[in-house]
Amino acid sequence: MSIKVYYSHTPFWRAEVLRVSLFVGKVEFEDVRISRDEFIYLIKTGLLPNGKKVPFNQLPVIEVNGQIIGQTGGIARYCGKLSNLYPDDNMHAAKVDQIIDSATEITNLISPTIREKDVVKKNEARKQLTNKLLPRWFQYLENILEEEKSEWFVNNEMTIADIAIWRLLGWITSGMLDGIPKDIANNFPKLQNVYIKVHQHPKINEWMLKTYGKTI
Ligand SMILES: N[C@@H](CCC(=O)N[C@@H](CS)C(=O)NCC(=O)O)C(=O)O
């Protein structure tokens, strides 16, 4: 089977949940990094550099034996199934899905503030995220971990849900989002623990060093 994952050269969660789960599951894939110009071209035309059409003029996409699939959640489940990081049990699977969908919702709260050009509006939106919206979502996730009585989101084992949240939290607490403090998740110990556990996973450590030359 030939698998290619297409995304920009960043460790953003949408792509990393795909790349990292395949790597952890020892599933061979080609990690295709799209340049800025290629990405702009794709948004305008829906075409990858190899001329193939993507379904929604967005990234990430995965190409499997020549067929291209979009939408992070769907691709993440596909990669999770190949990698044994997505449960067979329907209820456990739904529990993973709710976390992946939450990662998407949180991203959708932040993304408009990245695109906002008006500085005053941008600062106001970032304040709202810092003081209200992000803590609210972190608390929801913390509550789920509390109810699971586990260090992982689902069934006491690492799944694509933990990998997605690890990279999402890494982004939000990186300091690269002006106005959002690096310690914003400090009051959520179980969530922090998921971050640490994924970050310290030996295969994930290997991935970071191999791909980025450091553990980021
Ligand atoms: N619903 C899509 C959203 C993907 C998305 O927004 N990707 C961004 C990059 S992180 C993108 O391609 N943006 C370009 C655009 O939407 O025009 C998913 O879940 O994969």
Image (cartoon, rainbow, N blue to C red):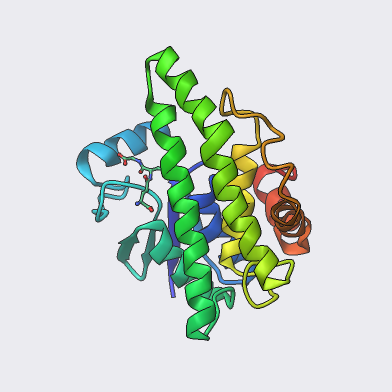
In this rendering, the answer to whether 91 lies above or below 66 is: below
43 sits left or right of 171 in the view: left
Instruction: Locate ligand 1 by image quadrant.
Output: top left
Point out the image quarter for the C terminus.
top right
Residue in view at x 47 percent, y 74 percent:
94
Residue 97 placement (x, y as % from top left): 47, 68
* Number of numbered discs overlaid on the protein picture: 0
Residue 4 lies in what quarter of the image? Answer: bottom left
Depth check, front residue: 26 or 139: 139
2 sits left or right of 22 in the view: left
Outermost residue on the bottom side: it is 89
Residue in view at x 50 percent, y 77 percent:
93
Point out the image quarter for the N terminus.
bottom left
Residue 186 placement (x, y as % from top left): 74, 42
Residue in view at x 28 percent, y 36 percent:
41
Residue 22 lies in what quarter of the image? Answer: bottom right
Residue 77 placement (x, y as % from top left): 46, 70
